[in-house]
Image (cartoon, rainbow, N blue to C red):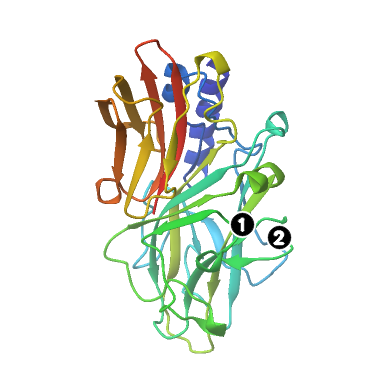
Amino acid sequence: MRKILILFTLLFLITNLKAQHHIVFLLTDFETNYPNHGLGGWLTDSINPWIIDETNPENIWQIGEPYKASFDTAYSTPNAIMTDTLNPYPVNNHSTFEYLITKPEWAKDRCLSAISIQFIHLFDTDTLKDGGYIDISYNKGETWTNIIDDTKPYSLHTYFLYDNSDTLTDNKRGFSGNSINEWNESGISVTFKEEDAIEIDSVIIRFNFISDDINNSKVGWIIDNIRSEIYDFCNIGISDPEDELETFVYPNPVTDISIIELPEINKKYKVHIYNIQGQEVYNCVSNDFIEINQNDFNAGIYFYKITNSEDKINTGKFIVK
């Protein structure tokens, strides 16, 4: 615990010197209360995991204090990462920075089962072709895919992100227009199949800003409070066979109504369901089955813990689409 506190202290100091970001060591309370459920998270090797492409002399992404008429303050002062801290963005520009998520050396045998990214941002661009979009790479930058076109994950959830109707230069899909009156929070959550989770050792999220040949003196894109979370689900549900209950969820993912089927009817089972942050969102006592109604849960990943009167335990997960 002392090492974790030291890491968080370093993280706090550095993020107040630079743009604000957080890499979360996950579910510490959940791990403390349920140490055998097999779920874990870990910090990346780098406390400052973003990389601005300095090989491109025209790259306009900078970390600093904003001094623009529309972008005059960071969300978490003093600094943010933005398309130039002082000047409007230029024409015919393509600038990038990358956010790296990688396994620490000590966690090389763990699974990279899921990642999530959240960030606070404002944008002010020409609504025709200028704007920002997000790519993802699973092979250290050899190939890239716009996040909304990504088909590799078992599941992909986004919120307050762009969609297929938002078209930029070169038919890219991304953010454009004006959001300068209110900070927005956007997020991405990616879950992998178990075989991919074992093989993938890093993910790069690339933030792109592009502009066409029309000069409009707009201010661009400012991003703050980037938060990443990393999950290992590979061993969830594994316990001592003599103490393990057999349960399963079908269908999974949940698209309407699913059932957690309990081992035997007419026996009392305590059921607890937790969200991805380890917060309990539901509990009950049942002697038959548990009905999961899609309308009762936000989209995302959930975990359940079931115990009987003999203190036998089963844990598992399900996804709500």
Q: Amino acid at mark 1?
A: Glu
> Residue 134: image x %, image y %?
53, 64
What whole-number distance in Å separates the C-alpha atoms at marks 2 and 1?
Answer: 10 Å
Disc 2 packing (10 Å; few <14; some 14–19; many ≥20): some
Mark 1 neighbour class, 10 Å CA radius: few under 14, some 14 to 19, many 20 or more: some
Provide the residue designation for mark 1.
Answer: 98
Asked if disc 2 and disc 1 are in contact, CB closer than 8 Å, the reply is yes
* Residue of label 2: 141
Task: From the viewer's perspective, tell me whether residue 107 is left or right of residue 89.
Answer: right
* Kind of residue at badge 2: Gly
In the image, residue 119 above or below residue 301: below
Q: Nearer the viewer, residue 297 or 288?
A: 288
In the image, 111 versus 24, the foreground residue is: 111
Tell me which residue sits at (61%, 57%) in the image: 98
Which quadrant does the C terminus fall into? bottom left
Question: Is 52 drawn above or below residue 210 in the view shown?
Answer: above
Question: Under tag 1, what secondary structure?
Answer: strand
Outermost residue on the bottom side: it is: 214
- Residue beneath the point at 69% across and 44% down: 201
> Can you give x and y, in whole percent of width and height, for residue 140 in the image?
72, 55
As rendered, which of 306 and 223 lies closer to the eye?
A: 306
